[in-house]
Amino acid sequence: MPEPYVERVLIGQRSHEHINPHAIGGLSLRDERRTAMFFPSEHITLVGGERIISVIPLGYQPIIDAHVPGTNCYLIGGSVHHNTGKTVAGGYECTAHMTGQYPDWWEGKRFRHPIDAWAAGDTNETTRDVIQKELFGQVTWNSEGRKTMDGSGIVPRETFGRITWKQGVQDMIDTIQIRHVSGGWSRLGLKSFDQGRRVFQGTAKHLIWLDEECPKDVYDECLTRTGTTAGILLTTFTPLNGRTEVVKSFDMQRAA
C-alpha cells in the first residue's frame, strides 16, 4: 500500500482577478450571473433593514494554496477557518478528477481515465444540502418527467449521466455517472458518516472526498479504500473538536 503524505502548504497573496473556482480547463462552469456570489458589485440586503454606510478596505487577503506536485499517492487535509471556501475547493478538485478537465496550471495528480469516487458529509441531509448542491445544483425535472439536477453547481451539466436516487432520503443522489474526457464514465456515490464504517467497506476507490471531520474509524477505512488504486483521500474541515485523532494524524504525517 503506497504511503500517503501531506505536501507543504504555501501561503501567498493573489488578486481576485486570478481566482476562478468555477473554471476548469478553460471552461466556464458557471454563467456570469453567478459571479456576484464571489465578487458582489451590489450590497446585499441586511437583516432588519440595516444598510452599509462605509467600507474599510483590507486589501487582498492571504489564501492557502495546497500545492501537490507530481503524480504520487497523496493526502490533502483542509483544516481551515469557517466560510473560507473549503467545500468549493473540494468540489472543484472532485470535478477536475471526475471529468478529466484540468486547468493548465494543475500540477497534482491527473486521472487519464474514468474514476470511481465517493463524497460524504456528516449526515445524509447535509451531504444532500451541501455537497450535492455544490457539485450539481438543485433538483429539477426534465422534459421527460424524470427527476434530475439543474447543473447550477460546479460539475458541467453536459457531463451528467445516469442518476440513481437514495431510498428513504428525499431528493438525495445515491450514484451519478459523470462523462470523462477519455470517453468513459466516472461514477460518484454519496454517503454520510452517520451510516458508520460499514458502508465505507469493500470496494477500492480512486477518490474519496470527506467534507467535515469524520470519525477516525471512517477515516481509516477510507484510507484503505484508496490504498490499491494509488488514489486520493481529500478532507475539508474546520477542527471544531480540537486535536482529535484525525487532526493529530496530519501532524504525524508532517513530522514524518
Image (cartoon, grey):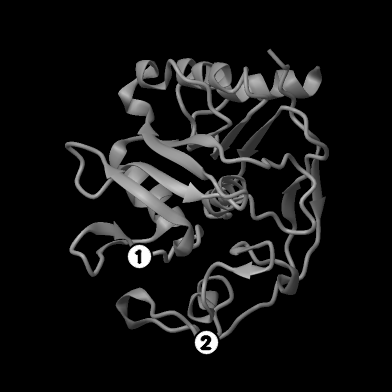
Q: Can you identify the residue that label 1 sits on?
A: 150
Q: Earlier in the sequence, mark 1 or mark 2?
A: 2
Amino acid found under the numbered disc labelled 2 = Ile
The residue shown at (29%, 43%) is: 164
Which image quarter holds the N terminus? Answer: top right
The quadrant holding residue 253 is top right
Badge 1: few (under 14), some or many (20 or more) residues near its Cα, within 10 Å? Answer: some
The residue shown at (41%, 57%) is: 136
Residue 6 position in % (x across, y down): 74, 29
| Foreground pick, 178 / 131 | 178
The quadrant holding residue 160 is bottom left
Q: Residue furthest top?
A: 1
Residue 117 position in % (x across, y down): 50, 35
Q: Can you identify the residue that label 2 sits on?
A: 53
- Kind of element beneath mark 2: loop
In the rendered view, tell whether residue 216 sits above or below residue 173. above
Residue 37 position in % (x across, y down): 50, 72
How many numbered marks does the figure carry?
A: 2
In the rendered view, tell whether residue 228 sits above or below residue 205. above
Q: Residue furthest front?
A: 183
| Foreground pick, 44 / 205 | 205
- Kind of element beneath mark 1: loop
The residue shown at (78%, 39%) is: 68
